Amino acid sequence: MTHWLRSYGLLLGWTALRSRATLPLNLVIQTCLAVGIIVGFAYLVPEMDDATALFLATGAPVLGLITVGMVIGPQEVASSKQEGIFDFNRSLPVPRSALIASDATIALLTALPGMVAALVVAGLRFDLDLDISPLVLPAVLLTAFTAIGLGYGIGYGMAPPVARLMSQLVVFVALMFSPITFPASRLPDWFESVHTVLPFQYMAEAVRDTLATPADGVSGLPFAVLAAWTLGGFLLTHRVITRRP
C-alpha cells in the first residue's frame, strides 16, 4: 500500500507537470462550456418554467464532466500514444492502477471548477431553490468516474484517429440527443429505450435528484448503473494498459 501511495503521488506530480501547458486552458474551456449551456440554452426557451430551469441547471455540470472525461480524456490519451508517453508510462516500475488513478484525479480536478461555476450561475440566472442531499458528492464522483473510465477506455483501447472521432461522436450525442438538459419523454420511444442502457440519463438523474431531492427520495438505480459502467470502464482501461506491447 505504501508503494502504491508513493507511486500515486509521484505520478500525480508528473501528470500535472506534463499537463501544465494545457491545464489552465482546459479549466477555462470547461467553465465557459458549463456556464454557456445555461446562458445559451435559456435563449432557446421563450418562457422558462421551474422544471426546465432545473434540467438546465443540473444538466450543464453533467455535460462538463462528460466533456472532460469522454472528450478531452481520449484525445489526450491519443496524443500520449503518438508522442511515446504512453509507452514510457508503461515502462515505469509503478502499479498500473496508480497510473490510471493519477490521470483520473487530474481529469476530475479539471472538471470541478466548471461544475461549481455552472451551479452558481444557474442559481443567479433562474433563482432556484435547491434541496441538496448528502448523496450529492457520491453522485458527482460516480458521474465523473463513469465519464473518465469510459473515456480512458476509449483512448487506450482504440487507435488514436478512431479515439478522436469517437470522442467527437460522444459529445455530439451527449449534448444534442441525451436526456440530460431535457426529459427523456421528449425522445422517440426507441431512442428513449436506448438511453435506458447508456449511462448519460443516469448521470443526469443522479446529479439532479441529489441537488433537488424529490419528495419520494433519491433513487438507487442511477447509482447502481453508474457504478457498473465505472467498473467496466476502469477494468477495460487497466487491461489495455497492462497488456504486453
Image (cartoon, rainbow, N blue to C red):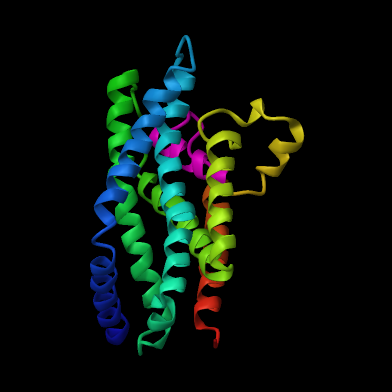
Please state the extent of the stretch shown in magenta in the rendering: 200-220
Residue most extreme to the top: 47
Q: What residue sits 39% from the left and 35% below the top? A: 211
Q: Is residue 138 left or right of residue 163?
A: left
Residue 106 screen position, x and y as percent: 31, 61
Q: Report whether 226 appears left or right of 54.
A: right
Relative to 44, does residue 228 appear above or below in the rendering? below
Where is residue 28 drawn, in percent x and y?
A: 28, 43
Q: Is residue 122 above or below residue 80?
A: above
Q: How many marks?
A: 0
**In terms of image quadrants, where is residue 33?**
top left
- The verdict on residue 91 being magenta is no
Rendered residue at 49%/54% (across/down): 70
Please say if 24 is above or below 240: above
Residue sitting nearer the eye, 60 or 31: 31
Residue drawn at 71 percent across, 37 percent down: 191
* Rendered residue at 59%/41% (across/down): 173
The quarter of the image holding the N terminus is bottom left
User: Can you see residue 106?
Assistant: yes
